[in-house]
Image (cartoon, coloured by chain):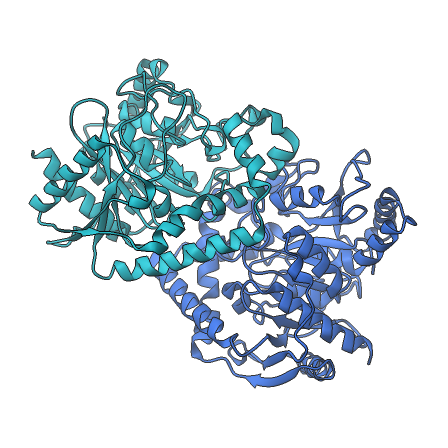
Chain colours: A blue, B cyan
Amino acid sequence: MISLLDIRARIADGTLPAADAIRGARERIAAQDPAIGAILRLAPETAVVPEVGPLAGIAVGVKDIIATADMATEYGSDIYAGWRPRADAAIVSRLRALGAVPLAKTATTAFAGLDPAATVNPRDPGHTPGGSSSGSAAAVAAGMLPLALGTQTGGSVIRPAAFCGVAAIKPSFRLLPTVGVKTFSWALDTVGLFGASVADIAHALALIAERPAIEAPAPERPRLALCLQDFAGSADADALAALERAVRAAERAGAVVHDLVLPAPFARAWAVHPTVQDFEARQALAWEYAEHRDALPPVLRGQLDRAQDLTAADYDAARREAHRARRQLKELFADVDAILTVSSVGRAPRGLGSTGDARFNRLWTLMGVPCVNVPVPGDGLPLGVQVIARFGDDGRALAVARGIEGALARE
Amino acid sequence: MISLLDIRARIADGTLPAADAIRGARERIAAQDPAIGAILRLAPETAVVPEVGPLAGIAVGVKDIIATADMATEYGSDIYAGWRPRADAAIVSRLRALGAVPLAKTATTAFAGLDPAATVNPRDPGHTPGGSSSGSAAAVAAGMLPLALGTQTGGSVIRPAAFCGVAAIKPSFRLLPTVGVKTFSWALDTVGLFGASVADIAHALALIAERPAIEAPAPERPRLALCLQDFAGSADADALAALERAVRAAERAGAVVHDLVLPAPFARAWAVHPTVQDFEARQALAWEYAEHRDALPPVLRGQLDRAQDLTAADYDAARREAHRARRQLKELFADVDAILTVSSVGRAPRGLGSTGDARFNRLWTLMGVPCVNVPVPGDGLPLGVQVIARFGDDGRALAVARGIEGALARE
């Protein structure tokens, strides 16, 4: 993979012009993407490459539900074939202001739903890369790009990161602006980042969010809570083994780890995530459903069909459950620096028929708390663990994740 | 003015075909708007007019920061001249699903900021109609349309409603979807409704939000708190006199009214509203600022210039103040059905140089609570009072407002 911090160091010491770094990304995409299908389209060759700025020389992949003024934005759907927004999304403008080049639109499932995109997993093309940020995770995993934007409403950042073996963060809710991002659920949609290492995404996030503290070091002896999320069912044996390895690595890095069984309000919140999501999706995608229902892919169409029966009372009850759990989680984090849990049920499923399951992710999206995927090295397709901190403490999640990543690398 | 409930009654009893009701709106616009400038453009003559649906026959004005697939959407700015979104905003789709006809785009200040639009006040063309939902308030006040959509980030629904003498509601935050609405501040932007009477907007809101309880009657003896918002300065003498009249009317309608002085956390929350707003506006309008700064109107350009200096720490501190005040407001509403206060500093200012001041509105926008403008009849330019209820209890605010409106009408 291509490290953002490595590119930045070479640009800073004068050995790599920013334009060369961007050209390198174009060349890698041309060489590798035909076998992967992560990239939908590229910025014009004439696009300006800033030579200055803290992210100069960084080519960024932009999930194709995020608006770009210089590239079509199709939301993974023929309904928007060739559609060109007038303006960049806020996050894209921010990247440009930092000197980065939003170079490529990356494949997304239709409207960031569950119907698979055509991208394959770069670690094994017989498997899904996960979704809905399929192209962003795959492009970073394949070493085409050092940074890519995704979005998560259920598990659409952490799951593909785990399946493809890349670092990723779903930050605290609305830490990164969603203006210009196609809405699925306004209470859940969260812009996230993919990179080659935890340090890479911490650096990018600190710059994008203008919060240097995001790169601060971890507490010396972080207090970690190991959480299996039993209400979500059981993870695969090898996912649990990877979690166990991460726990041992964290302990070697100085952490104190205890077990945590989340009380009943969290199970209830987990159960109502789809109600919040789908009641909002029915409104957010009302035009598409009313005018182009037949052009919607089957899983999303069925989901929206069922969502027509949800009532405002269902939604209000779900939001109350979420609110209660959020309050309780805040108390829980008084004694805990981070929660450790699996990033996915297991390794990437075979074939492209499904993008996998978000059941170990969706509680945390509903809670709005920062989640980091740390790849756990090993044989076969990748596995990952999730490091979760309290709302607004993205730096804590990243610092603990960095500690685990480092200890795993020294194994 | 044209009453939505009256049109609906005539359609229900078969004396008014929906198509005639829509044609009537077109005719009134053609006759009256040249002197007012509320309407920017109309749906094609070929637009379908549903004959069924609970809002069939209702022509709706749509503020031009809200996306429409069949009409250009220009955000009040040359930067978006002729721009045509691919999809309707969620609220527009919802209106269509109810049988209404989104008939006209109404004038907005640029990006719903403070630079005036060209619309005049239909009560006296020498005065501003207020902003930023200038055209929507004016179109309803002039009797061109029975319903119009606005948005409020500071006071952009309640203030123009007060200046133009129409009923309006800024509902609870996110009761109505903002998907497809140009963002200024995602924590504040709220879609609202203008109509000829409180009963009209209550009926429309109950249908649009699928919440019949919004039309429920008020408690028999509502407990009202009279609040002057001293931290915002003093209102004009005639605004205070109108508030006093509204209090007497409420008492005749059965209410028990006591005085309320909001404690210090509310003054602090009031003071930080611009920090939340402008820190988000800087991100939301980053593309426009980066690519078209010179084409921005002067007040907004200056606001965004200054916003560049705001830090994430400023923003976080402001959000904490808002959070504290919201919690305290919730407790306060345990003993109070609604708060009564002025809708604006006074009557619409002379000329079109300013759209007026939002200082009596912005606290409530930051709190996310429902606010209803009740016009107070009298000589000269209109005045209004604001009825405010707790978050999620839009029906309570509307029911109390209806009681006051009725008692004022019987004076």
Q: Is residue A255 left or right of residue B345?
A: right
Q: Viewer-proximal residue, B16 or A45?
A: A45
- Quadrant of the rendering where the C terminus of chain B is positioned: top left
Q: Is residue A173 left or right of residue A107?
A: left
Q: Viewer-proximal residue, A264 or B401?
A: B401
Q: Is residue A357 above or below residue B338?
A: below
Q: How many discs appear?
A: 0
In which image quadrant can residue A313 be found?
A: bottom left
Q: Is residue B295 above or below residue A379?
A: above
Q: Viewer-proximal residue, B146 or B272?
A: B272
Q: Position of residue B289 (x, y in %)?
A: 61, 34
Residue at x 72%, y 53% (from the top left corner): A148
Q: Viewer-proximal residue, B258 or B158?
A: B258
- Quadrant of the rendering where the N terminus of chain B is positioned: top left
Residue B338 visible in the snapshot: yes
Residue A85 visible in the snapshot: no
Q: Position of residue A5 (x, y in %)?
A: 80, 58
Residue at x 17%, y 42% (from the top left corner): B402
